[in-house]
Image (spheres, rainbow, N blue to C red):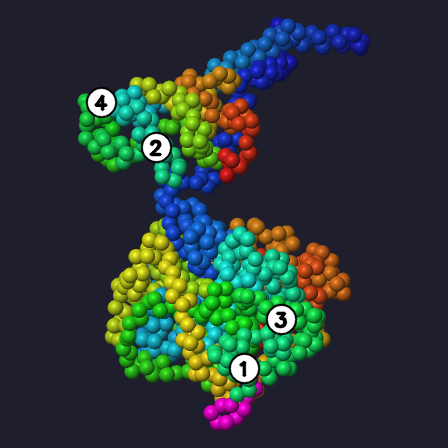
Amino acid sequence: MSTQSDNQTAAAGNRSSGWVVFVFFMIGLVASIISGWVAFPKLLYSTKQQPIDFNHQVHLEQMGGQCNACHFFREDGSFSGSPTLEECKSCHMYPMTGNENEQKFIDEYVNQDKEVPWLIYAEQPPCVFFSHAAHVRGADMQCATCHGDIKNSTSLREYQENRLTGYSRDIWGKSMLRLGEPDHGGRRQKMNDCAECHLKETGSKGNCFQCHK
Amino acid sequence: MKIDRRCFLSLVIGGAVGTTLTPVPWKLTDDIAIWSQNWPWTPVPEDGPSKFVKSVCTQCPGGCGITVRTIGDRAIKIEGQPDHPVNNGSLCPRAISATQHLYGPSRIQGPMKRAGERGQGKWEKISWDEAIKTVTEKLAELRTRGKPHTVACISDTDGNGSSYLMDRFLQAYGSPNFIRTPSSADAQELALYLSCGRQGTIGYDFRKADFILSFGCALMDGCDTAGQVMSAFGEQDKKTRLVQIEARLSDTAAKAAQWVPAKPGSETALALGLGHVIVRDGLYNKAFIDNHGFAFEDWQDDAGNTHPGYRSLVQDHSPDKVAKATGLSEKVIESLARSFARAHRPVAVSGLGSAAPDSLDQALAVFALNALAGNFQKPGGVFLIDEPDYLSWTEMKIDKTASAGNQHPRVDGAGSEKFAHTRYLPNRLPEAINSAKGDSPVQALLVAGGNPLYTLADPRAAQKAFEKIPFIVSFSTFIDETAEQADLLLPHPHFLESYQDVPTPRGMAHTVVSLARPVVKPQYDTRHMADVVIQIAKNLGGFIENAFPWKNYEDFLRKSLSDQWKTLEKKGFWSDSRSRDTSLDKIFRTSSQRFEFFPMSKFAAMNGNGNKKAGVEKIELPGNIDKLPLVLVPYTSMRISDGAVANTPFMTKTLDANVVLENDVFVEINPKTASEYGLSQGDKATVKTQAGRAEVRVNLFEGIMPGLVAMPAGLGRTGFSDYIAGKGANVYSLIAPAADPASGLNAAWGARAAIAKA
Ligand code: SF4
């Protein structure tokens, strides 16, 4: 018949020692931190290329330096966004340069009468109402303030798509912690980012229904 | 070293702790939220350039101009057309939410024929060719058998191009049975015809009038006139005094300067009582009556018999008697009469937009007040608007079969010796069919608008009659209560998908014609009913074909409207205020060429009827007063569509929880009456009338006179979709028709009722 203390000793002998437990804890901790910081972003975002490369700088020179030559306001004040095939065709019905991207555009889109499926870096979910007119015309803001210096870019950045939501990484921001501004020089564009800027510029974050109609 | 369960657990705990130190949980939470907002079945607004298309709402006779914002081929938003003469930008919830019907599940998606029993809801898709062939063959067969007059057509209007083509088809084919569904317009039009000799509508210059005396009109409650009246009252610094006579504190009453709660059914007596005071005190417009009035004083007919005039008629309606009939004090009656007579630009209005019909005598008595004031064809007064003449009707020849068919008396009895001046008697149709011996007098029925199995008083009797009709075709856009009982469905496009001319809405003080036009492409395999009828006429051949020299409805409209078409295309409407300039000498086309206080033609008709009295007819509600001690009255609400087409789901959502709660409709009862029956707020109860019963809930309302039970019209649908059907009960199914002896029209303004706690 064993005593109580015998029992305890036997139990301790059967268990792993404290440091082993601690090591396992640390392995779990470090492994998850590494995978959370390194593997997770890689997994979450897929990298895509735009269907054709596009040189904003060259186009801007040709169009008199005006963004609104292609990204214009419609008569009703709504914003046209990316140009449609129809609009591109008004110059590029036939090749104007020897550029391979232009050739690709004509072969694959103009000749086949297909819209170019541009990947939109700043696309917001459909539940968001955003008025370019209020910002560009009303508040006199520059395109670059939010979209970065696209004007002087000579080719299109790669597009990182969130596999879960389908939206561009630009909206959240490059940094997983939402620190700093995105690489492209514009702004992060999640709801809190809008609110933050509105608070600074207008003194109020605004009301829900202003953006969610 | 021993590795055991504890090690494994610490690994997991370490992992969990570590994970919280990474962006994983925080980022994923955010992303999952966004992912869930973008599930593929979540509706997403179209993106692209907007277009604004001017059109007109045809969902009620109101004729409000609309502007539809479209993106691509999608109608996004409907707003009031700001410069439209009818509504000036205002709009009711029915139009605002009309896209829900356009894209909703109640649409009939293509021609279909019945596959099961009637009403079973089993349909088989067919082609348009087969559908049109089926109708053509049936009609050809009836014609060969010498029975073209057994074909009838029901429509909700007789004023626009497509109803004209329907009527024209019947005439060319050989049937007199074009029937318009009932509305509060019926008695008004007849009163106008009898007293002024004109077929058309009565226009009121609401914008300029300074005193509007409304006899229970749903001016701001229902559709019909909502657009005009809201825009008239929306004008700033308006000094118009609106007085609402109504047993219930409706929205119109609430917005009025004065609310006069008179017993329902006593409006005729009140109008004559006001006339009594005005005549007694000599406050009437003598110049107008001397120059343009007839039968104000007693008069003699051609045979030398003397008949009482208006003065003698109102003699009987002294304030003390009227006070008893109406429940108002003599003082109120006296002062009302005086304020009306002393106003500069007063109008007295009845029968606009109300859920319950007026009697002919009420329409005449109220209209006569305008003649006492002599305010015809003047700013702020009454204008007589003729039936539309903008469509240049072309003559047609008909064959012998057709002319023999057209000679037959109408199946509803309208235009017969008894009801010589009444054009349509839809409420008599069920009775005519149900009481016929042998075959039904209607062998084929074309339902080209309206929804009679919902809107007719006592739809159960109508249902019984429909069961006896061997062949029923519905042109409805939606699977409504009537379409459910049809044999063949030939769906007409939604009003945002097709052309439709809209004549001057009732109440408008000048001519306004609007054009509804295709705003989006047809969503389904639908065809304009007028196109279908033109095709059937062509298939039948001969004189019938020749009566339709148009390719289709659009061709017909373009040719008929010629010059005006361009204006309609551009502006969406065309208005003509020439109708306002007509001098008083020319406006009355009665045999006396004057305004007839006692219409001779009414007298002649009643004479034929063996009724020589000049007095007014009281409409008695059927039912035993001991067993049914209360009175059920229907009411209209802007948020409930009481017409052929049901509410949109959005409209039902806007109803307060004391109007509809889940599937129950509330009836309004004065707390005093409720306590007599032991009812408290929210109680479930049963309302019983001679025509039927309904399960309801009780809403205690100080704004309704004791002894009444008020129930909204427009609920209790069985058709349409699951989002719409099954809410509340249909008040019309509780109110059996009561024929107005003077016109034959239904004048049942309510029903005797009982209520008991369920
Ligand atoms: S009042 Fe009638 S016509 Fe006017 S918007 Fe409403 S439903 Fe349409």
Q: Give the range drawn in magenta.
A: B300-309
Task: Verify CB contact (< 8 Å) between mark 3 and mark 1.
Answer: no
Whole-percent x, y for residue B675 in the image: 76, 62
Whole-percent x, y for residue B322 in the image: 67, 75
Q: Nearer the viewer, mark 3 or mark 2?
A: 3
Task: Verify CB contact (< 8 Å) between mark 2 and mark 4.
Answer: no
At label 3, the amino acid type is Ala
Residue A100's disc number: 4
At label 1, the amino acid type is Phe
User: Label 4 marks which chain's residue?
Assistant: A
At label 2, the amino acid type is Phe
Mark-to-mark CA distance, 1 and 2: 71 Å
At label 4, the amino acid type is Glu
Report crowding for label 4: few under 14, some 14 to 19, many 20 or more residues within 10 A (C-alpha): few
Question: Seen in the image, is B633 located left or right of residue B523?
Answer: right
Task: Name the residue carrying label 3.
Answer: B337
Residue B180 drawn above or below residue B641: below
Give yes or no for residue B304 being in the magenta stretch.
yes
Whole-percent x, y for residue A90 in the image: 24, 33
